[in-house]
Image (spheres, rainbow, N blue to C red):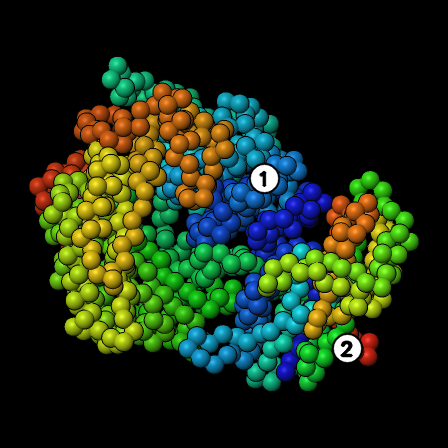
Amino acid sequence: MHRLLYEKTGNARWISQLDMIRLFQRAFLRAGIAIKHSEGYHPHAYVSIALPLPVGQESRCELLDFAAVDGTPLSGIPARLNPVLPEGLRALDCFESSRKIRDLALLRAQITLEYDHGAPAPEQVAALFAQPALLVEKKTKNGPAQVDIRPLIRELTVQPCADGLLLQALLCAQNPGLNPELLTAALRAHLPACAPDFARVMRLEVLDAAGEPFR
Amino acid sequence: MKLTSKLERILPRVQKPARYTGGEYGQILKDKSRIEVRVAFCFPDTYEIGMSNLGLRILYGTMNQPDWCWCERSFTPWGDMDEQMTAAGLPLYALESGDPLAEFDLLAFSLGYEMSYTSMLHMLQLAGIPLRSEQRHGLNQMVFAGGTCTCNPEPLAPFVDFFVIGEGEELNTEVLTLYRQAKAEGWDKTRFLEAACRIPGVYVPAFYDVRYGADGTIVSVTPSHGAPQRVQKRIVQDFDQAYFPAHTIIPSTEVIYDRTTLELFRGCIRGCRFCQAGFTYRPIRARRPETLVQQAITALECSGYQEMTLSSLSTSDYKPLAELMTRLLDYCDPRKINLSLPSLRADNFPEELAERLKAVRMSSLTFAPEAGTQRLRDVINKNLTEDEILTTCQTAFSGGWNAVKLYFMLGLPTETDEDVLGIAELAKKVLHTWRTYGSNKKRGVRITVSTSYFVPKPDTPFQWQAQISPEEFTRRQRLLREAIDSKAITYNWHEPDVSYLEAVLARGDRRVAPVLEYVAQHGGKLDSWSEYFDNQRWMDALAACGVDPDYYAARDWGEDEILPWDVIDVGIRKSFLLRERRRAHEGVTSPDCRHQCGGCGASCLLREGTCDA
């Protein structure tokens, strides 16, 4: 399997997961990179994106699996893709990988909390996430459910920044994973006085269970 | 574009936010500090509709050719975005730069259908730009408009500073060049418009004084400021070599027509008497197959699209279609590119073409017999016989097709109940054909019958005709619904309200303008969407403005009446339209242009060469 590491920042963060698949199928063709097609009556270029990124979040560590054919040199692929990608998408690396996506265990993310009328004390926010349990309402297939997100938070620091507060978090990535937006939801639910006016999320790195970057 | 914090906070709350950010591959960015003329191409419908429009891509490309001009895009936001923008005090902006439309030199509106008029006004409101031309004093915020609907621009006369009539590829550049000079030399608005109206194809409505008689009809139209008596439509003289958007914007989010579109030819040889496009896009000008194949390959390689469609008013009338298809399929087949062919006529759909197309992808077959009986098809000059329809269906069914869509109109001139019931008969015969020849009976068949409400349009032989009343349309629709009794046949019917208003706007004059203004000021927008169309709002507007819709829709117009759209010359002689009108009422067909030139007059628009019928 061939794997592409790319970033999705700026305006590209509004592109949905489904649109990303279509976008990359076309981008590979534009770049003249032949990739393997699915079998069947309507064959499509096969691309698969690990760990769908919620619309509106940015990332520096997106992974896309595909299969280049004709022995295309992988190292040259980012340079060929980048000129044909839309604003905000940038291929960083391309390599062979045998690691299964299910081994992707952890996600390092930063959440910027913006306060229009002054930020609360970082300690106050940090204290909330230090509690032994933290229930948050989450939309599920069977309607809203209360989920304890605390076990899914491995590390979390809070510090002041220009816009307000900066949360640096190490979170479970999948099975189950924690959408960093739920940290903001927890603030809204349990510390309404510390709820931000706006929150932006940036994925920084995906890691395996041992805490090494997952590639 | 650079996202402002206001916009950034709105986007998480709206559906499909990628529609509002620009940044797609292929968008054109320029350094605005080095730009002399800034144009916002405003499409009065959603991003998904606008980005599916080939005209937008052509004009975006040509207006960006001069390095001193930057043309950007703007679309009508969907309701959720609209509310959020209004609440946040965020004015409408262009997608490339994110700059508010109010900062632009020119706003270019593309008007493809009457029901988009209110979206145009709504966009101006969202941009904070005054609606009426007389309220905009400077050289900036100049509003101009073009597109199919501008063959009768009159309902928009008070809002638009100037119209560009006909094909815009060359005309727009001439206008922009003049504007560049005007801006550099500090002309005032009137001086610019006086110079602009001397460019062939430019119509400045403020320079025409329209007088009405006691019965409401137009008595005189008097030009001033040196404007011509009639403005003649512009065309691209050398269509084969005309600009084609091979390098174009590839939307990052799904749009309606998300594929490469090749434009085979402009104009139509058929002369169906109800069809505005069939007359107003004349004369016939075709691209050579070599040109098209080259354009196809470049466009597909530049876009990465896996789908391509051929576009024209009647694709099977493209003379070298078989040669073109063979060459395109040779390229597309091995690359798994899906080729689709809309606008086929039932009478000349070649069997071998069906075979090769089937190999690429099975899809549904669409025919537009328009009328249910031969008599009425003769009246409208749809030279298509029942035999031809059924023979083509036979070919298609035995070739494996199992879905047919049939399009008709109700309320065509001289239509009787017999003609209405003829639609059901024809659909049943198509079903019978499938039962006899269908190659895969287990899959079943889907026959879809759709009827629209006939709208008499300017520049057609039916331009003088009264539209039937909405009540009568509903009665005929019910009659047909009761006559269709097979489960294999689906009948798509709809409310008459929109088509009735379309008839008012299509033949409207300047007195209709306040109605549009009222609708827009009372929240009207995206009126071609059932989510937003509100008939009551239109009825209120008509009442408030004292406009009788039946004067425009339900009246038999006099043949010697001055028509609101007489000021625009699309190249078709009135004497020709009158002759065709008489032949219609006699039930006599006219041959297509290829068999015998009907002398419509459009070839006069060609500086050299002849109409390529």
Q: Disc 1 residue type?
A: Glu
- Is residue B121 at all visible to an observer of this figure? no
- In the rendered image, residue B528, in percent from the top left (x then y), is placed at 41, 43
Residue at screen point 20% across, 51% down? B482
Residue that numbered label 2 is attached to: A208
Residue at screen point 49% across, 47% down? B46
| Label number found at residue B83 | 1
- Dot 2: few (<14), some (14–19), or many (≥20) neighbours within 10 Å? some
Q: Nearer the viewer, residue B497 or B131?
A: B497
Chain designation of label 2: A
- In the rendered image, residue B131, in percent from the top left (x then y), is placed at 51, 28
Tell me if residue B132 comes above or below residue A16 in the rendering.
above
B574 relative to B583 in the view: left or right: right
Tell me if residue A117 comes above or below residue B354 in the rendering.
above
Residue at screen point 53% across, 45% down? B78
Q: How many marks?
A: 2
Marks 2 and 1 share the same chain: no
